[in-house]
Image (cartoon, rainbow, N blue to C red):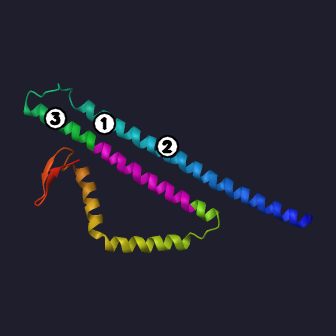
Amino acid sequence: MFVILLNSCHHLIILLIFTILVILIIVIALVLNTIVRIAISRFVKSAIKRANDKAPQYKKIADNTTELSAMVMQQRTVQRVKAIGQLFSSAATLIIWTVAITSALSILGINVAPLLASAGVAGVALGFGAQTLIKDFLAGIFIILEDQYGVGDVVDLGPAIGTVE
């Protein structure tokens, strides 16, 4: 009887340790995600402040095309910085939580090596199958980075005409 109780107590302690480790991983992921989001937000705010400081303060209505052009460029810079900040924030969140979930599964005794290998194979298959989607996604990122189009621009793409949102 004492051996069964001791064995049961041993399993309970191991279960408690695993639970604490998983909770610790989740807390670390939450804190790290918050820190990264705050850092990206501060970077975006400082970049917007620099863009606003570089551009002279204009009235609500521009007097000439030079002032209008500077106003539009300043607004586009702000929009581009916000879009890139959101992209980095989403990518960081995805990476942090993927690592946290993989670590938690590993602690719980689930072999993650086959999972990672199959995810790699699925990623390659998805890459081959969705090449045009990936090309379009990367092209969109570079359009934002190079400031080829801005929010509010009217674009004519041949069969489609629309406003960039």
Q: Position of residue 127 (x, y in %)?
A: 34, 70
Judge whether 83 appears above or below 107 on screen: above
Number of labels in the image equals 3
User: Could you tell me which residue is drawn at 30 percent across and 43 percent down?
Assistant: 81
- Say whether disc 1 or disc 2 marks the residue closer to the N-terminus: 2
Marks 1 and 2 sit apart, C-alpha to C-alpha, by: 20 Å
Q: Is residue 98 magenta?
A: yes
- Say whether disc 3 or disc 1 marks the residue closer to the N-terminus: 1
| Crowd class of label 1 (few under 14; some 14 to 19; many from 20; radius 10 Å) | many
Query: Magenta region: which residues?
Result: 80-102
Q: From the image, tell me which residue sits under label 2.
A: 35
Q: Main secondary structure of the magenta part?
A: helix
Q: Mark 3 belongs to which amino acid? A: Ala
Instruction: Please tell me whether mark 2 sits on a helix, a strand or a loop.
Output: helix
Q: From the image, tell me which residue sits under label 1.
A: 48
| Crowd class of label 3 (few under 14; some 14 to 19; many from 20; radius 10 Å) | some
User: Could you tell me which residue is drawn at 31 percent across and 46 percent down?
Assistant: 83
User: Label for residue 70?
Assistant: 3
Location of residue 55 by image quarter:
top left
User: Could you tell me which residue is drawn at 35 percent across and 36 percent down?
Assistant: 46
- Say whether disc 2 or disc 3 marks the residue closer to the N-terminus: 2
Q: Looking at this view, is 61 or 144 the one in front?
A: 61
Instruction: Please tell me whether mark 3 sits on a helix, a strand or a loop.
Output: helix
Q: Are marks 1 and 2 in contact (CB under 8 Å)?
A: no
Q: Position of residue 60 (x, y in %)?
A: 17, 26
Q: Position of residue 86 (x, y in %)?
A: 36, 47
Judge whether 130 appears above or below 89 on screen: below
